Amino acid sequence: MFKYTKHQLKKVENLLTEVGYTIRYERGNFKSGYAIVEDRKVAVINKFFDTEARINSLLDIITNIDIDPAQLEEKTANFYALLTSKVIAARDNAEEVEKST
């Protein structure tokens, strides 16, 4: 299973960096915990979030943008495949269960 550690946070940050996004941690009034400036490929995350919340915010961003695994380095592409197959799928299943109850 996926662990919410600083090492995993760095991997998720590197994934977004490889597809051209800049990640900034700043204070803000974000309803979802983050904001995306689409035309500049900048993701702004609430700087007061802990590691787990930061990772979850970045995963939300990853699910909402188009990522071509072919443009990623092999190691990052493997990590992206892991994310899409396990973590993101598990989060989607949890949301479906929540909606059905």
Image (cartoon, helix red, strand yellow):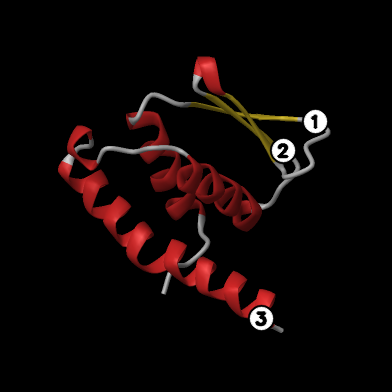
Q: CA distance from mark 2 to mark 1?
A: 6 Å
Task: Judge left or right: residue 64 versus residue 76.
Answer: right
Q: Which residue is mark 1?
A: 28
**Within the image, what quadrant is residue 47 found in?**
top right
Q: Where is residue 99 shown, x and y percent of the image?
A: 68, 74
Quadrant position of the C terminus in the picture:
bottom right
Determine whether label 2 and label 1 are within 8 Å by CB: yes
Q: Earlier in the sequence, mark 2 or mark 1?
A: 1
Q: CA distance from mark 3 to mark 1?
A: 33 Å
Mark 2 vs mark 3: which is more N-terminal?
A: 2
Left of 88 or right of it: where is 99? right
Residue 13: x, y in percent? 45, 39
Is disc 3 placed on a helix, strand or loop?
A: helix
Q: What residue is shown at x 29% (from left), y 53% (from top)? A: 79
At x 71%, y 47%, the residue is 49
Q: Which mark is residue 46?
A: 2
Q: Residue at x 38, y 68 (%)?
A: 86
Nearer the observer: mark 3 or 1; the answer is 3
Count neighbours of disc 3 (C-alpha within 10 A) and say few if under 14, some if 14 to 19, many if 20 or more: few
Q: 101 or 35: which is nearer to us?
A: 101
The foreground one among 55 and 64 is 64
Identify residue type, mark 3: Ser
> What residue occupies the far bottom of the structure in this picture?
101
Q: Which mark is residue 100?
A: 3
Whether residues under marks 3 and 1 lie with C-beta atoms below 8 angstroms apart, the answer is no
Residue type at mark 2 is Asn
In this view, the residue farthest toward the front is 100
- Residue 30 placement (x, y as % from top left): 78, 37
User: Tag 2: Cα neighbours inside 10 Å, few (<14), some, or many (≥20)?
Assistant: many
